[in-house]
């Protein structure tokens, strides 16, 4: 059974780059035709889709992030990564990775603060 | 992007009652690529329905999804105590951005 585990620094300073990884176990990031997504949720608010990268290499992002987000697949490490540049307090949220719609990680809290 | 509007924002019901949640899209959702999630406080969302009507593995049959095009519905036939939570719809069929609805909270009356 596929398991996803997000990790990364819990605290990021404003204007810096947030970098998160999603380790995939029990399955491979290659093959299967899956799309790998990142989603975030500010405390007490709803879910916001950040973007996805597909197994074929296609990617797409939430236009509201104005090109700050990059999602990539590291096949050698069997991981998915997220980089979000120029962060601000509004980027404070729990960040989830997901394979398609069926498999989600437990999420990791990122706080943006000086 | 496709905007999903969920209604009502809050639904106050008693255990045993039927819950009907709506998700309306600003344009047609391609291929019925519409999912429903349940989320409880402090937990990751759990997928209930995908492809508009298919129950995910392990989801009780009191949960059902219907709809196509721009109008979708999640029905919980008889509410159990563990069903009181927040529910989100998501469209994942767009070749552009995927999107979530803003959520419907089902609370105990």
Image (tube, rainbow, N blue to C red):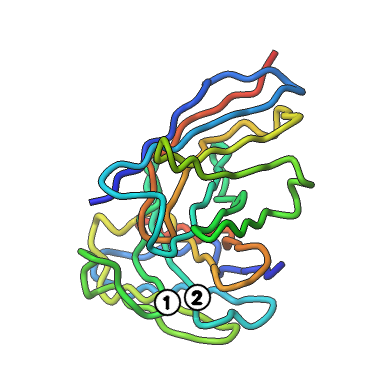
Residue farthest to the bottom? Answer: B68
Task: Please determine whether, in this image, residue A12 is positioned above or below residue B108.
Answer: above
Residue occupying the point 30% across, 64% down: B14
Q: Give the quarter of the figure containing the C terminus of chain B.
A: bottom left
Residue occupying the point 45% across, 69% down: B35
Q: Is residue A20 left or right of residue A70?
A: left
Residue farthest to the top? Answer: A114
Residue occupying the point 39% across, 59% down: A31
Q: Which numbered disc covers residue B51?
A: 1
Task: Please determine whether, in this image, residue A60 is positioned above or below residue B95.
Answer: above
Nearest the eye: B96 or B66: B96
**At numbered mark 1, what does the secondary structure look like: helix, strand or loop?**
loop
Label 2 and label 1 in one chain: yes
Circle 2 residue: B33
Mark 2, Cα crowd under 10 Å, few <14 / some 14-19 / many 20+, is some
Nearest the eye: B67 or A18: A18
Q: Is residue B76 left or right of residue A57?
A: left
Q: Quadrant of the rendered structure where residue A107 is?
A: top left
Q: Position of residue A39 (x, y in %)?
A: 54, 47
Residue occupying the point 65% across, 23% down: A112
Which of disc 1 and disc 2 is earlier in sequence? 2
């Amino acid at each position: 059974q596929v398991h996803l585990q997000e990790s990364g620094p819990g605290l990021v300073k404003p204007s810096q780059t947030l970098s998160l990884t999603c380790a995939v176990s029990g399955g491979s990031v290659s093959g299967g035709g899956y799309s790998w997504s990142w989603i975030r949720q500010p405390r007490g608010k709803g879910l916001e889709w950040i973007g996805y990268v597909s197994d074929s290499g296609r990617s797409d992002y939430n236009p509201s992030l104005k090109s700050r987000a990059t999602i990539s697949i590291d096949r050698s490490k069997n991981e998915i990564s997220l980089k979000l540049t120029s962060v601000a307090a509004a980027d404070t949220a729990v960040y989830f990775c997901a394979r398609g719609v069926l498999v989600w990680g437990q999420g990791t809290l990122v706080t943006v603060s000086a | 992007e496709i905007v999903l509007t969920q209604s009502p924002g809050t639904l106050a019901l008693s255990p045993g009652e039927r819950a009907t949640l709506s998700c309306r899209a600003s344009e047609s959702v391609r291929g019925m690529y519409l999912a429903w999630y349940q989320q409880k406080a402090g937990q990751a969302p759990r997928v209930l329905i995908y492809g508009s009507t298919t129950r995910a593995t392990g989801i009780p049959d009191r949960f059902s999804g219907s709809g196509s095009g721009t109008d979708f519905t999640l029905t919980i036939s008889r509410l159990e105590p563990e069903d009181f939570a927040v529910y989100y719809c998501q469209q994942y069929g767009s070749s552009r951005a995927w999107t979530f609805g803003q959520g419907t909270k089902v609370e105990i009356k």
